[in-house]
Amino acid sequence: MQPKHHHFICWNILLFFLCGCYRYDPPKEDPLLIINAPSLYINTVIDKSVIEPIAVFYHYRVPLSVQGMLRNFVNNISEPGTAFNQICQHKKQSALHSITRFFYNSIWGLFGIFDPASRKGLLRETASFDDTLSGMGLPPGPYLVVPVLGPSYARKSCANIIDFILNPGIILGYNDPAIIAQRGITIRSDNLASFRQIYAVSPNFLSLYNEVKNITLQTASGKTASQDLDDSLNDDIF
């Protein structure tokens, strides 16, 4: 990054904070605007300058077989957390299904690098603590953009902490920065076209902010049509 461009970014970030502190009157639908705007701006700069180039290289240069093995491995270590949430949602049969997948792939799939369970008809299911809280009637809460982690909403941001704790990678050492970064790059790589479309229809930062916020709030209300894009917006840098 050129020094002048770096200074320009720093000044813009500072202006966001200064403008937010001057007679700040947040709209009811976005009470955390003073935090969300600068956070999204920072995330967008990081995404365009660092994450997107890496994701493009990963998407087009890393062999599909390798990408598949890495995706299988990350999916496999999330199965116990999925089973826990399925139990909380009173889906005992689904929980047994997820636990069976975990042990089957861990043993016969070389710690989840391969997915022989799917070939046996045990297809992967998903369930998060956010789904569990939603089923309990807890509202999504205000729109929230977390620096680096991306746009979300209050309920999901708290639920992500629980999902991380439930991940057996903490005990097995799989949650080191390299594994977490690989998951983020995989999600970003899988959604290159979606992200490009969002950038293309957003000629300025205000329109980008509103576009990302609308997608996230639609997700919170259960109206989104693309779960993969939801995952990428909420779990990756944006």
Image: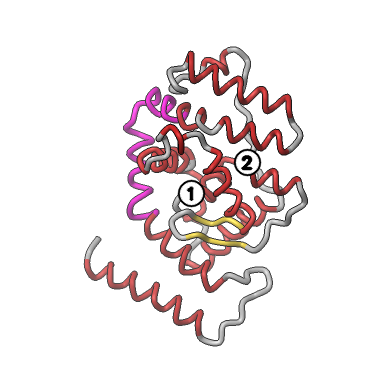
Residue 43, percent from left and from top: 43, 59
Residue 96, percent from left and from top: 67, 23
Residue positioned most to the left: 3
Residue 17, percent from left and from top: 45, 77
- Residue 12 is a magenta residue: no
> Foreground: 105 or 232?
105
- Quarter holding residue 86: top right
Q: Which residue is mark 1?
A: 195
Mark 1, Cα crowd under 10 Å, few <14 / some 14-19 / many 20+, is: some
Going from N to C along the chain, the mark reached first, 2 or 1, is: 2
Question: What number is the disc on residue 6?
Answer: none
The stretch of residues the image draws in magenta is 47-71
Mark 2, Cα crowd under 10 Å, few <14 / some 14-19 / many 20+, is: many
Q: The residue tagged with tag 2: helix, strand or loop?
A: loop
Q: The residue tagged with tag 1: helix, strand or loop?
A: helix
* 2 or 1: mark nearer the eye: 2
Residue 92, percent from left and from top: 73, 28
Q: Quadrant of the N terminus?
A: bottom left
- In the displayed structure image, the side of residue 172 where residue 208 appears, left or right: right
- In the displayed structure image, the side of residue 238 where residue 30 appears, left or right: right
Q: Residue at x 64, y 55 (%)?
A: 155
Three-letter code for the amino acid on which mark 2 is drawn: Ser
> Does the magenta stretch mainly form a helix, a strand or a loop?
helix
Q: Which residue is mark 2?
A: 128
Three-letter code for the amino acid on which mark 1 is drawn: Phe
- In the displayed structure image, the side of residue 89 where residue 232 appears, left or right: left
Q: Residue at x 45, y 35 (%)?
A: 171
- In the displayed structure image, the side of residue 215 where residue 191 appears, left or right: left
